[in-house]
């Protein structure tokens, strides 16, 4: 909100492109370990620190390698672009290490601590970015605040886990990490397809139109992403609970619990939809500034997909807890192909609005496929009344 008022859309377009690219790289440095860690710790909490040590032992070398490749590639092929990309890569890749500690706390079902450590990065940003902008800092100088916030988030998360639970036994032994890689690679593919699903629109608007168009689309889409925070606590709490219920084969309780959280997710999504329909133009200008006038139509279209996005988040979580990640990979691959093909047709003809309509169509496709995936998994597990009641 602050940066879009200080820097023009074409400059912010470079920043949004850099962060979108870094989030794609993050898929490989995280390597699907967040989902694995929550599920593993929820099932065997007494071995939680061992699981966390293995995950960090895999992630730290991957993160270092990714930072070197991104920095070296930018310096070699786009030196003018390098400062923003390098700073954005440190912000995204280093900062996400805090989520490994958060995944451990989620698996232990200590949600209060998980919430508190998640505040460290945002608090650091709120404390430093306004000061940097007021002092007349450039975008590159301001991004140093983002880097500092990432470091603060990792330090706080690591200290909380160390003090509360004990020493984390880091594991760099190949013989122990290879089984972890074997377990996590389906999650890598699944998360890659999901992030591509979320970020390919911005990248394609950037490539097919302009950096200014990418900034206008991304600011509207960021609001939809922010609204997902309304459902994230529900998904965070529900995932280890569902994993535990399925592991104990408490099928009736899992079915009832799943039904409740899906209905709640849909209700929250409808609430977001109504907010977006009231006065989207005023929302965009109020949040992002006068440079983004005329983008209310984008926000209105994107918010039409809010109920589907919320239900899909819970649906993916339920299917993952059921162990259906391979089927989810096929589902998301289909959705990604559909998204890219439709964007290639819609963006040149309709502009950024074409990408927004594609998002709505893709989420509708995902919802239908998820419903079939979960129903099949329910039948396979022989849940009571599986043919008449959803999980």
Image: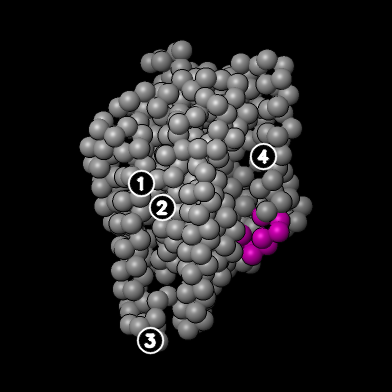
Q: Nearer the viewer, mark 2 or mark 3?
A: 2
The answer to whether 281 appears left or right of 348 in the picture is right
Q: Earlier in the sequence, mark 2 or mark 3?
A: 2
Quadrant occupied by the C terminus: bottom left
The residues bearing labels 2 and 3 have C-alpha atoms spaced at a distance of 30 Å
The residue indicated by pointer 2 is 305
Label of residue 385 in the image: 3
**Sooner in the amino-acid sequence: mark 1 or mark 2:** 2
Look at the magenta stretch and give its main secondary structure.
Answer: helix
Horizontal placement of 76 versus 53: left or right? Answer: left
Disc 2: CA contacts within 10 A as few (<14), some (14-19) or many (>=20): many
Give the magenta-colored segment's residue range.
Answer: 106-114
Q: Are marks 4 and 1 in contact (CB under 8 Å)?
A: no
Q: Quadrant of residue 78?
A: top left
Crowding around mark 1 (Cα neighbors within 10 Å: few <14, some 14 to 19, many 20+) is many
Q: In whole angstroms, how far apart are the C-alphas of marks 4 and 1?
A: 29 Å
Q: Residue 59 appears at what percent x and percent y?
A: 52, 43
* Residue at image location 40% in from the left, 76% down from the top: 390
Looking at the image, residue 349 sits to the left or right of residue 16; the answer is: left
Element under disc 3 = loop
Between 136 and 43, the residue placed more toward the observer is: 136
- Tell me the number on the disc at residue 359: 1
């Amino acid at each position: 909100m602050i940066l879009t008022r200080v820097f023009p859309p074409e400059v912010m377009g470079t920043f949004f492109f850099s962060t979108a690219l870094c989030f794609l790289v993050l898929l490989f440095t995280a390597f699907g370990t967040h989902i694995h860690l929550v599920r593993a710790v929820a099932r065997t909490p007494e071995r939680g620190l061992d699981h966390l040590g293995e995950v960090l032992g895999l992630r730290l070398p991957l993160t270092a390698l990714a930072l070197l490749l991104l920095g070296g590639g930018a310096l070699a092929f786009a030196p003018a672009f390098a400062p923003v990309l390098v700073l954005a890569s440190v912000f995204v890749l280093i900062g996400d290490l805090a989520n490994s500690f958060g995944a451990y706390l989620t698996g232990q079902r200590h949600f209060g601590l998980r919430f508190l450590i998640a505040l460290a990065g945002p608090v650091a940003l709120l404390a430093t970015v306004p000061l940097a902008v007021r002092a007349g800092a450039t975008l590159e100088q301001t991004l140093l605040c983002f880097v500092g916030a990432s470091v603060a988030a990792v330090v706080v998360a690591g200290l909380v886990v160390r003090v509360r639970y004990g020493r984390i036994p880091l594991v760099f032994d190949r013989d122990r990490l290879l089984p972890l890689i074997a377990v996590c690679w389906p999650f890598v593919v699944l998360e890659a397809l999901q992030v591509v699903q979320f970020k390919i629109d911005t990248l394609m608007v950037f490539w097919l139109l302009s950096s200014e168009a990418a900034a206008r689309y991304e600011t509207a889409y960021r609001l939809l992403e922010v609204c997902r925070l309304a459902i994230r606590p529900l998904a965070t709490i529900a995932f280890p609970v569902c994993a535990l219920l399925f592991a104990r084969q408490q099928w009736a309780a899992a079915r009832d619990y799943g039904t409740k959280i899906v209905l709640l997710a849909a209700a929250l999504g409808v609430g977001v939809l109504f907010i977006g329909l009231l006065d989207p133009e005023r929302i965009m200008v109020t949040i992002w500034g006068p440079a983004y006038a005329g983008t209310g139509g984008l926000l209105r279209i994107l918010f039409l997909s809010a109920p589907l996005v919320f239900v899909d988040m819970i649906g993916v979580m339920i299917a993952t807890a059921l162990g259906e990640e391979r089927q989810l990979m096929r589902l998301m691959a289909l959705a990604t192909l559909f998204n890219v093909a439709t964007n290639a047709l819609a963006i040149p003809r309709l502009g950024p609005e074409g990408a927004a309509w594609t998002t709505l169509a893709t989420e509708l496709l995902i919802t239908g496929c998820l419903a079939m995936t979960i129903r099949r998994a329910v039948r396979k597990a022989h849940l009571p009344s599986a043919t008449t009641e959803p999980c």
